[in-house]
Amino acid sequence: MDSRVHAFLSVDKSSALDAARRWDARRADADALPPLAGLPVAIKDIICSQGLPTTCGSRILEGWRSPYDATVITRLREAGAIVIGKTNLDEFAMGSSTENSAFGPTRNPWDLARVPGGSSGGSAAAVSADMVPLALGTDTGGSVRLPAAFTGIVGLKPTYSRVSRYGLVAFASSLDQIGPLARTVADAALLLQVIAGRDPRDSTSADLPVPDYSASLPDGVKGMKIGIPREAIGAGLQREVNDAVLAAARVLEQAGASLIEVSLPTIEYAVPTYYILAPSEASANLARYDGVKYGLRVRTPDIHAMYARTRGEGFGTEVKRRIMLGTYALSAGFYEGFFLKAQQVRTLVRKDFTVAFGSVDLVLMPVAPTVAFKLGEKAHDPLQMYLTDIYTIPVNLAGLPGISVPCGSADGLPIGLQLIGKPFDEATVLRAAHTYEQSTEWHKARPQLT
Amino acid sequence: MSERTTAIAYEVVIGLEIHVQLLTDSKMFCECATAFGAPPNTQTCPVCLGLPGALPVINRKAVELGLRTAVALGCRVHGTSQFHRKNYYYPDLPKNYQITQYEYKIHPPLGTKGSLELTADTSPRRIGIRRVHLEEDTGKLVHVEQHGQILHSLIDFNRSGVPLMEVVTEPDLRSPEQARLFLGRLRSLLQAIGVSSGRMEEGSLRCDANVSLRRPGAELGIRTEVKNMNSLRSVERALAFEAQRQEQLLDRGQPVGQETRHWDERRGVTFSSRTKEEAQDYRYFPEPDLVPIAVGKQWIDEVRASLPELPDARRQRYASAYRLSPYDAGLVTSSMPLAIFFEATVGHYPQAKTVANWLAGDVAAYLNAEGLEIEETALTPNHLAELLRLVDAGTISIRTAKEILPEMLRTGASAEQLVADRGLAQISDTAAVGSVIDRIIAEHPGPASDFHGGKTQALTFLVGQVMKKTRGRANPELVNRLLREKLQS
Ligand SMILES: [Zn+2]
């Protein structure tokens, strides 16, 4: 099936089978089993894992094998999960369609002519097409939530610093978060439970207790206050998306929540702010791919030519574009006007949410302005592509938890509902998403891959 | 008299940047060992190799040592301090950015605005400390050469990520000698507070200098940066050379180029290391992988309380308790090991001034010539005390003592052993000295009769001949007395 979807870049068949057999044997012994015993989990190929290559969807790391496991991989293995394979992505997670992979695009299982969203398109497609029950993605500007919305599954971006980034190959360090993709909210909660929590190897990871997410799922939304930002509804939205999101809000209202209009006046500046900050960090994070130590090396007699040719041939167009954007924004004479200014706007965006959360428990809005678009449709128009993330980027800038849960369809393509919570309040996000999901049938719809 | 008046018309302005390898067991941002001399790339991990996905974690001990320095230098210690990324490409820098600290108003380095007092023979002078900050070291390139051509280069990442502290002074130093004195003071301070081994030859203390000339009171001149000075002495030599070079340029009406120059210890010159000085843009920005260091008042108070006696206080104590001259007190406290050596020697031989004279004189000369620290020699305080006692007892002359000291420093031999083995004890035996005198008088009848004729300088000549015959071992007082007796009899 994957020959048509192209969700995976590598699959570990033999050790996965071995592990599955081992867990089956233990299940027969009725031992106390860890939470993910024997469950295959697909991993976005930007998370380091031993035993399989870690390419980041880039020629520059083609064939590179990490000598160490990311913290989330260690935790998955300890929880009994089987790392079944590495999934396709936009190169270094830079993109919204998975078309920027050096190894070819992933296709949307609902319509093979359409993109699965990105950058975690491979992980989302693998779950959507029932190849695996669970997957990990990463979300820097919407890269878990957008593909979840486009492929009709659940995708959660945890609070920044909730999940360790150790072993996640950095794109934009102050924004990157690893998050679960699953068919149901309950499954996503289960996976988050395993990967969340303090990691001494990531000094930005929060030293806060991790609540029992699954336990509070059935508690419902009675008395919960849900804010709908007036800036996020109406103009610029595909009509069916607008209608589906408002209908979803009413479902939650009927379940006992109250709806309140809120305002997030600065979110219109989120996309330009993001495209200063993320490329700036990326320009430094990606400097290490120089042909000296690992990955691609284009041999030349002198080192400067080696740097230039290795990076010239190893990186794709979008990665180069962002490295140049970031290098420019950090340059002497531009730093104050670009990087520093963007940092200030980021603070304002965060403040907007803080103010909103003074009166509500959750913020509800769309995940994306449209349903999945066609392959090639925006590939040559970076600005149009960037605007796909208009509703997800503000959440990354503010460092908040956000979930995408299926809430409708247009022309047979899934629509995602986004619920955003207070910092470290994934429990409320999951509870509301679960309540919504259980009140509707959308999560039961599956793509017909014939 | 020379017509040139420029020699006094210029003022030398020097600021120093000192890189200090901190005495931690593990690296700045990972758990790898910092021990010197391990086989290449055996002290590495994903973090210090800059592997994809690896993240830095701050070494608390390194921050503590930086804090000790900042407090000891009287710096303003900032409540929060942020790391930055300094972006540049070099193969020994695995991430192609260095994690360091940078002066941004909102993200200050660990400490700023401190000072260290310099007391030379002249009046005291406070040298401003602009900042104290922490950073990581780079790896080391090893070039494999054949027939003078580099075939290929290898990289040893053992040093990558080793904790470094940078101490930057204000341009307050006014002579190469002051620069050397300052560096000596700083080194001794860092040793005293347990921050650094202070070994410049091993690179655990590295010093770069900014040098410019100006007419007194005028604007600062164009400065050059001098690198690669590996000892206190080479700092003074290099800066003296560089100041003179700039002076000659200015005298000829030529401009000083803003450039980086390397000191060549062997040739005794500085040379330009980059022909074209490109203004490097390091694109500093706050390191997003690290949270700011929080330094609370309590931590600062704890550090302050735990500091030992600092060299300044120690110097003052020596000057008053042992009645040492300011110069001697400064010298014996110029390094922590030397100060400890001094006190230990005084424990065996209580005439502190004599001990200080020897340490400031012959011992210092030997250390300077050999480029060694006292603790790197084989000399023990006990042996030095013994040597001084042999002189006092008249067993050996001061001249003999000076002659055997280098050997004691080199081999650790005891003074008594050396004197016994080589028969160096003074000849104080009247009969033995008398027979030599008889021979000398017989060989030099002229001077002997001159003495009788009233020419007393003839006596000096004859004493010299006796000393020569005994290779300096005859007791000079005895020789004098016996000669007079024999000539007058
Ligand atoms: Zn290491």
Image (cartoon, coloured by chain):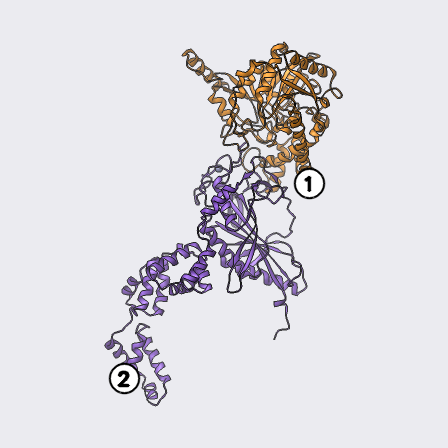
Helix, strand or loop at label 1? It is helix
Residue A391: % across, % down: 68, 23
Chain for numbered disc 1? A
Q: Is residue A256 above or below residue B252?
A: above
Helix, strand or loop at label 2? It is helix
Chain for numbered disc 2? B
Horizontal side of residue B455 vs A200, given as left or right:
left
Identity of the residue drawn at 61% across and 52% down: B274
Residue B433: % across, % down: 27, 77
Residue at the spot of label 2 = B486
Q: Picture quarter containing residue B335?
A: bottom left
What's the mark number on residue B68? none
Is the N terminus of chain A in the top left, top right, bottom left or bottom right quadrant?
Answer: top right
Is the C terminus of chain A in the top left, top right, bottom left or bottom right quadrant?
Answer: top right
What's the mark number on residue A336? 1
Q: Is residue B291 above or below residue B351?
A: above
Q: Return the residue found at the far bottom.
A: B453
Q: Picture quarter containing residue B179?
A: bottom right
Along the line of sight, which residue is nearer the eye, A324 or B346?
Answer: B346
Q: Return the residue found at the far left.
A: B431
Chain B is shown in which shade? purple
Q: Picture quarter containing residue B358?
A: bottom left
* Viewer-side label of 1, 2: 1
Question: What letter labels the chain drawn in orange?
Answer: A
Residue A435: % across, % down: 60, 13
Q: Is residue B91 above or below residue A407?
A: below
Residue B291: % across, % down: 56, 36
Number of marks:
2
Q: Is residue B265 visible?
A: no
- Name the residue type under label 1: Glu
